[in-house]
Image: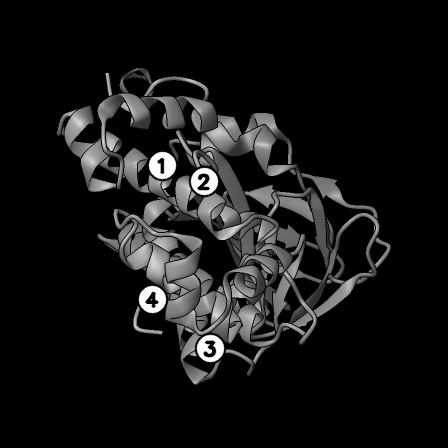
Amino acid sequence: MSRDTLSDLLRAVRLRTAVFYYVSNQADWAAQAPPAHEIAEAVMPGAEHVMEFHMVARGSGWAALQGREPVPLRAGDILMFPHGDAHVMSSAPGLAPERIEPEWVFATRHEPKPIPIAFHRGVLQPGATLPVQDADSILVCGFLGCDLRPFNPLVSALPRLLHLPAGHGGDWIRHVIDQAAKESAAPHPGTEAVLERLAEMMFVDTARRYLEGLPADATGWLAGLRDRHVGRALALLHERPEHPWTIDELGSRVGLSRSALHERFTAYLGQPPMHYLANWRIQVASVLLRESRRSVADIALEVGYESEAAFSRAFKRLVGVPPAAWRRSVSPA
C-alpha cells in the first residue's frame, strides 16, 4: 500500500500515552486494577477511551482477566487491555489481590509520575520502591487514551487482552522496556515526556505485531488492512477522502467488481465501502474542527461535501449534534 492507513487512523483518533506507575515486587503479591472507565478522568483527562498497559522489566508474573485463563508473563513481555477491563496482576494465579482503589488514583493524580509502588511480601506500599537487586519482579504500568467518536474502528478490532511475548517484538522493544524501567526508577527532567514517547512506540508496534499474527480467517479493521483488496481500498479512501468515490471506481482501482468489493469489504469491516468513507470523512473533519479555526463550510469542502448543509446533516447523523456545536463542546474554555 502507498498509504500508511494505520498511522492515519492513530493520528486521527489522537492517541495519547502516560506512564503512571513503577511497581517493584518481592515474594507473593497480587494487585487488582479497576476498570479504566472508573479512573479515566484521573489518569487521562479528556480522553473518551482509556486502555491500560504493563511492561515486564524484570522477573515474571501472571495476568488474569475475568472469564479467561491466566496468562504467564516474563521479562520483556508487553500486556495491554484495549477495552479497559478490570484485571489482576500477580506473582502466581489464584492469589487474593489487593485492590487499587479509584479514590487513591484520583488522590494521587497530581503526584510526579511515575509513582513508585512496592509489594513487599504481599503488603502494598504506595510511594515506596524496592532496590532493583531486591525485587523479584518489576513492572512499568501506564495508560493510553484515544477518541472513540466520531469514528474509531481500531479499538473494536483489538482483543480484550493483548499479549506480546518477549522476543516477538524484536530486540528494540526489549530496549524500550529497559529504558522505561530506568527512567521510571530514577526520574530526571523530561522523564514524563520520554516515557510518553516510549509508550506510544510500544503501542503502535504491539498493534502491528497483533495484525501480523492474525489467523487467515480473522475479520475486523486490522484484518481488512492486511487483505490485499480491502487494504488497498482503505488506503485509497484514507488518501483521498474528498474524492467523489463510487463503488465502481473503487472496485476498478483495487481489481474487483463492484459486487465482489462490496461483499469482501463488508465481510471484513461490517459495513460497505461508501458507508466507511462517510464515517472516515466525519472523523477527518472532527480533527479539523478541533485543531483549527477554519470555517465549517471550508472543512466541509475539504472532506468531500458539496455544501455546508449536506456536511452538517451527515455530521449530526453520526455524532448527534451539528459540527459547530460539537466544536464548541470540545474546544478549551
Q: Is residue 292 above or below residue 219?
A: above
Q: Position of residue 295 (x, y in %)?
A: 14, 25
Q: Amino acid at mark 4?
A: Asp
Q: Amino acid at mark 3?
A: Arg
Spatial separation of the CA atoms under disc 3 and disc 4: 25 Å
Spatial separation of the CA atoms under disc 1 and disc 2: 8 Å
Residue at which label 2 appears: 151
Residue at which label 1 appears: 282
Q: Verify CB contact (< 8 Å) between mark 1 and mark 2.
A: yes
Spatial separation of the CA atoms under disc 3 and disc 2: 33 Å
| Residue at x-position 59% and y-position 63% | 264
Q: Is residue 300 above or below residue 200?
A: above
Between 65 and 190, the residue placed more toward the observer is 65
Considering only order in the chain, which callout, 4 or 3, is on the residue closer to the N terminus? Answer: 4
Direction from residue 174 to residue 71 in the image, left or right: right
Residue at which label 4 appears: 4
Q: Quadrant of residue 171?
A: bottom left
Residue 174 marker: 3
